Image (cartoon, rainbow, N blue to C red):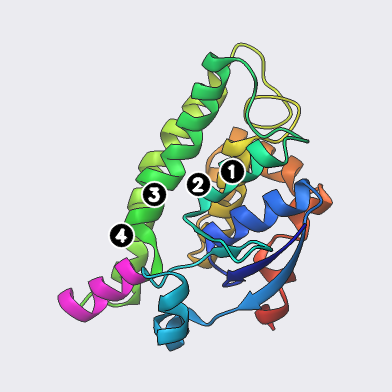
């Protein structure tokens, strides 16, 4: 099975999905967009994804899927190896909870359209936008770090010795943080997990600088 991945190299939601596709060994055609040029607001793309957001995944039968976490969980159900979510319901809930800290509490407040709106409607310059971004990242990753630190037994990755949903979201967010000069070293356990993930080819090849539109 091959897919069409409509995405932007710097988009953290796109990075999440690239990492999962790579982990599961799934082929995809890489279709890039430049968000700042409004390329996802074209009539053609809006017909694909009415929100005008990335990523969108088009399946072989033409079915269009949107929203990175929904796509990722579908992939995990249809292509279960290697599994992203554990079989135990309690462990699944814990993994999702960490993933949602990033996907629900950081990303909606810090994505490009929010930062652009802060600038256009409230006059926030780049420095103020960075202050906004850093605030929401910091208070959420502080809680994430505390969860990792309080784990009874520290695993190689967030919650186990194999990457899970939380790891995918964390890896993408740390790359987003780099754009704003937020050092991962502020959170020792998060730094440790990111370094471990960054040794895996599936994650390395999903990283923003490795994408064809990053040049």
The tag earlier along the polypeptide, 1 or 4, is 1
Picture residue at 64% right of the left edge, 19% below the top:
87
**Magenta stretch, main secondary structure class:** helix
Task: Count residues near mark 1 (Cα–Cα under 10 Å), then give few for <14, some for 14-19, many for 20+.
Answer: few
Front one among 9 and 147:
9
Q: Where is residue 76 in the image (x, y as percent from the top left)?
A: 65, 39
Gap between marks 3 and 2, in whole Å?
17 Å
> In this figure, which residue is indicated by the disc labeled 4?
132
The answer to whether the residue labelled 2 contacts the one labelled 1, judged by CB atoms less than 8 Å apart, is yes
> In this figure, which residue is indicated by the disc labeled 3?
106
The disc placed on residue 92 is none
The tag earlier along the polypeptide, 4 or 2, is 2
Q: Which residue lies furthest to the top in this view?
A: 152
The disc placed on residue 70 is 2
Task: Name above or below for residue 35 compared with residue 23.
Answer: below
Q: What stretch is highlighted in magenta?
A: 113-122
Picture residue at 69% right of the left edge, 24% below the top:
160
For label 3, the SS is loop
Q: Where is residue 178 in the image (x, y as percent from the top left)?
A: 56, 61
Left or right: 140 in relation to 81: left
């Amino acid at each position: 099975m091959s897919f069409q991945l409509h995405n932007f190299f710097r988009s953290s939601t796109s990075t999440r999905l690239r990492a999962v596709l790579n982990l599961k060994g799934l082929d995809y055609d890489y279709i890039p967009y430049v968000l700042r040029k409004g390329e996802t607001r074209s009539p053609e793309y809006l017909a694909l994804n009415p929100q005008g957001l990335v990523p969108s995944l088009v399946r072989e039968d033409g079915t269009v899927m949107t929203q990175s976490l929904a796509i990722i969980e579908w992939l995990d159900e249809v292509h279960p190896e290697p599994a992203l979510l554990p079989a135990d319901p309690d462990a699944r809930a814990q993994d999702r909870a960490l993933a949602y800290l990033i996907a629900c509490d950081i990303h909606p407040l810090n994505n490009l359209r929010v930062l652009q709106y802060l600038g256009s409607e409230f006059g926030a310059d780049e420095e103020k936008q960075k202050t906004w971004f850093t605030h929401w990242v910091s208070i959420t990753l502080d809680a994430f770090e505390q969860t990792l630190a309080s784990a009874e037994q520290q695993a190689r990755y967030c919650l186990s010795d194999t990457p899970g949903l939380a790891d995918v979201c964390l890896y993408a967010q740390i790359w987003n943080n780099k754009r704003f000069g937020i050092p991962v070293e502020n959170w020792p356990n998060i730094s440790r997990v990111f370094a471990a993930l960054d040794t895996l080819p599936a994650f390395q090849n999903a990283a923003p600088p490795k994408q064809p539109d990053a040049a």
